[in-house]
């Protein structure tokens, strides 16, 4: 669900939305150094190190504590970049949490979440690690208990400009306020869908195909689309029929991030 209920004077949109985790992740390795440097050892062609949120997260953490030893960061991407799945924000939160653990837990979760907000509005939710209802620009969050179905996530292979979607003249910006109770009873939609489908016919086509099997939804502004299934077997059956032009994966929905068990 992503309702846009207004717009602030600074241009940021006011939202009501819901986040849930997937048991599907990038792999990150952190090795402390002794010279204070932040070094990404992995070469990612489409993502220069200076633009990578894991590097920004480590650099931010270095400013928050004394005697930061430095770190080498190895990252193996599985989550589609630019797919609207929060991969970059999740990776940034992971770096903050693990570095804090390796350096003696000098910062509280609240301090880490406050710092993470500088990297992105949804970084704090990955730090806190619980499925949540979010408001404001995404920074006001409260835990929520959701069903944990299996998801089929489909990547249409296009990149959506979030800035263009949120600046589009056709975007609904006046959805009425709703409640958690109403959402849990089945209310809620994604206000970005009409604009995204109009601007990106590949996404419209992917949603139309997936909708034949289970209601298709959009990951924020996309580009990935998803549908939920009661069992892994049901999701697998649809996955095996997926057109070759798409990529995708199956994952379990989770209300608690597995990262919390690691740190």
Image: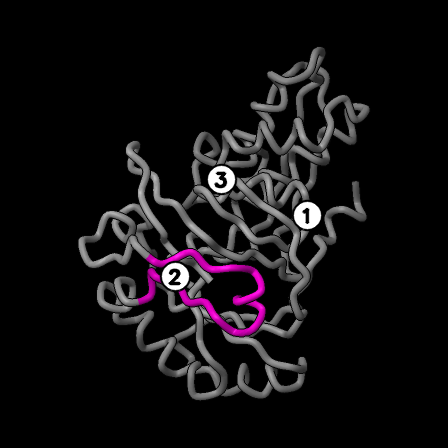
Q: Residues within 10 Å of mark 3 (few under 14, many from 20)?
A: some
Q: Is residue 39 above or below residue 242?
A: above
Task: Report how far apart the C-alphas of labels 3 and 1 lie in the structure.
Answer: 14 Å
x, y percent for residue 260: 76, 46
Q: Which residue is mark 3?
A: 121
Image-quadrant location for residue 189? bottom left
Q: Which residue is mark 2?
A: 223
User: Sequence order check: which comes first, mark 2 or mark 3?
Assistant: 3
Say which residue appears at 56% left-offset and 60% top-offset. 180
Residue 129: numbered disc: 1
Q: SS class of the residue under badge 2? A: loop
Q: From the viewer's side, name the closer residue of 8 and 164.
A: 8
Task: Report how far apart the C-alphas of labels 2 and 1 lie in the structure.
Answer: 24 Å
The quadrant the C terminus occupies is top right
Residue 33: numbered disc: none
Q: Is residue 180 left or right of residue 257?
A: left
Q: Residues within 10 Å of mark 2 (few under 14, many from 20)?
A: many
Q: From the viewer's side, name the closer residue of 175 and 210.
A: 175
x, y percent for residue 90: 59, 46
Q: Are marks 2 and 3 in contact (CB under 8 Å)?
A: no
| Range shown magenta | 175-193
For residue 190: magenta? yes
């Amino acid at each position: 669900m992503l309702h846009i209920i207004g717009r602030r004077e600074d241009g940021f949109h006011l939202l009501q939305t819901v986040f849930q985790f997937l048991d599907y992740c990038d792999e990150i390795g952190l090795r402390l150094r002794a010279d204070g440097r932040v070094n990404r050892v992995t070469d990612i062609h489409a993502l220069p190190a200076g633009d990578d949120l894991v590097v920004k997260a480590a650099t931010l953490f270095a400013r928050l504590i004394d005697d930061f030893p430095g770190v080498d960061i190895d990252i193996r991407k599985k989550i589609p970049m630019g797919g609207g799945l929060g991969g970059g924000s999740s990776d940034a939160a992971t770096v903050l949490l693990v570095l804090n653990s390796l350096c003696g837990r000098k910062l509280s979760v609240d301090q880490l979440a406050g710092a993470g907000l500088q990297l992105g509005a949804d970084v704090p939710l990955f730090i806190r690690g619980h499925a949540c209802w979010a408001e404001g620009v995404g920074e006001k969050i409260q835990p929520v208990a959701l069903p944990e179905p299996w998801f089929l996530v489909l990547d249409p292979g296009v990149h959506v400009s979030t800035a263009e979607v949120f600046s589009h003249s056709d975007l609904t910006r006046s959805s009425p306020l709703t409640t958690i109770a109403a959402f849990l009873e089945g209310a809620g939609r994604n206000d970005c869908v009409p604009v995204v489908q109009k601007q990106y016919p590949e996404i419209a086509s992917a949603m139309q195909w997936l909708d034949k099997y289970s209601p298709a939804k959009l990951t924020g502004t996309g580009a990935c689309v998803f549908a939920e299934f009661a069992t892994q077997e049901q999701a697998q059956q649809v996955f095996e029929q997926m057109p070759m032009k798409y990529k995708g994966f199956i994952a379990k929905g989770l209300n608690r991030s597995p990262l919390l068990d690691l740190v």
